[in-house]
Image: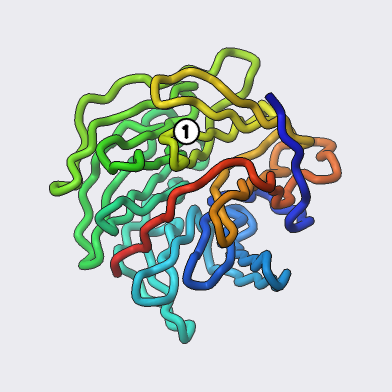
Amino acid sequence: MSAGYEVAVRAEATLGEGPTWDAAGERLLWIDILGSRVHTYAPGSGRRTVRVTEQHVGAVKPRAGGGLVLNLRDGVGLLDPDGTFRWLHHEPVPGRRANDAAVAPDGALWTGTMRYDEAPGGGTLSRITADGAVRTVLDDVTVSNGTGWSPDGRLMYYIDSPTRRVDVFDYDINAGQVAGRRTLAVVEDGAGFPDGLTVDADGCVWVALWDGGAVRRYTPDGRLDRVVDLPVPRPTACAFGGADLTDLYITTATTGLTAPPPLAGSLLVVPGAGKGLAQPSFAG
């Protein structure tokens, strides 16, 4: 089954990524990783902003007390509402950069990294709390990507893109720990690579397919039940937004394309695609 898309923001992002609905600000946050830019888009008014970061930015999320948390090349930083920046965790690693991140039900940030050359096992998935305490959860990741939680918070979904898998863990809400890694779904050869993901109110997992030109929805038992075909080859991530969390926003990329199609790098939206989950803010 396919659904129609619309153009929310026409852009030429190099590596558009990480859409996140900021309910308090009634706006969508998204980034251009390699363009070092944080974008906002308020669908109610059409207002847009762009902030340039001093280094590549892998993800941006709202903070519970206001401001933003940034997954940056050299660590995790906090941006206050007045524009003041400070590092929460600073750990530069030559040749490595930040990638996707997600906020867990307890308000901790799960941050991914990867090597610029995408060397196998060169990335990590870590958990960082508001006091700056960091725990590495996975240390053999290649391209750390989509992370999300089931509606009851007892399952965590995760993608390391080159594996072509969407994996699922049992998640301990109290301890913020995962166990029992297993495969939810495998993206077949020729259909692209799984990239960013989001989980809807029915517990289904929506996955953007890099080089697949589509977003797929998988049921909690791993069955493919919906495909949204797109006019670009490299959708990167998706998230529900809007006042009712029913519109599916999709980021896209131009990087690596010799002749990008007209909408590559734009922010797309599928109105009324489903019902999303309210996302927690970072507790810092």
Q: Is 166 situated above or below 268?
A: above
Tag 1's secondary structure?
A: strand
The residue located at (42%, 58%) in the rendering is 71
The residue located at (38%, 67%) in the rendering is 77
| Residue 170 in the image, given as x and y percentages of width and height | 23, 32
Q: Is 247 situated above or below 232?
A: below
The colour style of the image is rainbow
| Residue 132 in the image, given as x and y percentages of width and height | 23, 64
Side (left or right) of 167 relative to 173: right
The residue located at (37%, 34%) in the rendering is 157
Seen from this angle, which residue lies furthest bottom? 82
The picture quadrant where one finds residue 106 is: bottom left
The picture quadrant where one finds residue 155 is: top left
| Residue 47 in the image, given as x and y percentages of width and height | 70, 73
The residue that mark 1 highlights is 205
| Residue 143 in the image, given as x and y percentages of width and height | 46, 35
Q: Nearer the viewer, residue 176 or 193?
A: 176
Query: Pointer 1: residues within 10 angstroms few (<14), some, or many (20+)?
Result: many
